[in-house]
Image (spheres, helix red, strand yellow):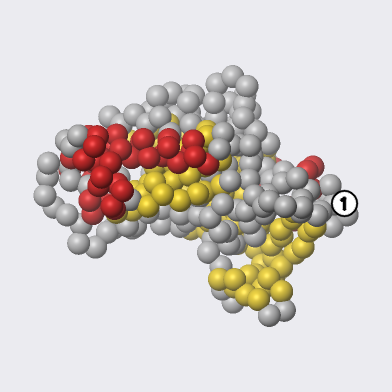
Amino acid sequence: MAGPGVVQADPPVIGLDHTHGHFSAEIEPGLAVTPGQRFVVRAASLLTNPLFGKSDEYERMAIPITGPIHVTGAVAGATLRVDIHRIGLADRGAMVTIPGRGAFGGAPLGRYGRTMEISGGFVHFDEDTRIPVDPMVGKIGVAVPGPPPVSSTVGTFGGNLDCREIRAGCSVFLPVQVDGAYLYVGDLHAAQGDGECSMTAVEVEGEVELSCSLVPEVTLERPMLVTPTSLFTIGDGDDLDAAARTALDDMLALVTGDRGWSREKAAMFLSAAADVAVCQIVNPRASARAGVLLDYLRSRRLRETFRPLVPVVNEREEDA
């Protein structure tokens, strides 16, 4: 199953002919993959839009997502693991501000857009300011049944997570909502601070090499993330407080199940050992993450389920 924007290559490539504005289950898949198969997703950005540079109506330039990708064997209720093997970026990025948007108080930000060169491992923000390149994926999620969410929102399906930990070498775990999963990916950033406080990061075209697998006997309510060192729960909400509570509640449930501790003891542990951080605070739904080191996991089942794509050094061997 491959649409006209798919390059027949090894690994196969789904291109910009398959960009959309919603996480829809009604769009014909542009690519079908089997578990373990590598594939490449090409992602659009602000600079892909022909309006950029001709208009400052940035509200009309929402960054689309590429997909959907049908994952063989994925059924509603399953857990999909998406491994990120490589992120490649173009050599130029863009940022914008829009009045009434962003996380700042005081006078509204003005309407402003600019482009910047990306070279030598840096974003050249201006003549004497360089920001280290730290490639990440802003939007990754699966389709939902019924009315599709827009690409700029976040929820149980994933979506516009804007979590800066979603880099090459990481794995995103998503609760499958429809048979086939219908995975979408997009919104690459050359650099983003936690919160994406002006509304955009350094938005850039590029491509992501991925593979998917199904996680047996695991049911998730919301996205999770594994990096080479840490495990993160990701929550969303109407505001940052609600998003952080959701992420912490999910981590509390995981720790009590892993250790057999009371909620009170597990809460103390998280207060001492977990990090809570904002992912995105500028869209109608905020997102936040709670993270602990993988080394704290005790049960063999959890260590196998959340085994990182890049192995952890000195991983604990004891079993619960």
Q: Quadrant of the N terminus?
A: top right
Residue 291 in view of the camera:
yes
Please tell me in which quadrant of the rendered image residue 218 appears.
top left
Q: Position of residue 187 (x, y in %)?
A: 62, 49
Q: Secondary structure at mark 1?
A: loop
Residue at (43% x, 35% y) in the render = 246
Say whether residue 79 is left or right of residue 7: left
Q: Quadrant of the C terminus?
A: top left
Residue 11 in view of the camera:
no
Q: Position of residue 287 (x, y in %)?
A: 52, 42
Residue at (39% x, 46% y) in the render = 290
Pick the front one: 117 or 2: 117
Residue tagged 1: 55
Q: Position of residue 142 (x, y in %)?
A: 52, 33
In the image as oriented, which residue stretches furthest toward the front?
A: 106
Q: Position of residue 130 (x, y in %)?
A: 62, 75
Residue at (54% x, 26% y) in the render = 144
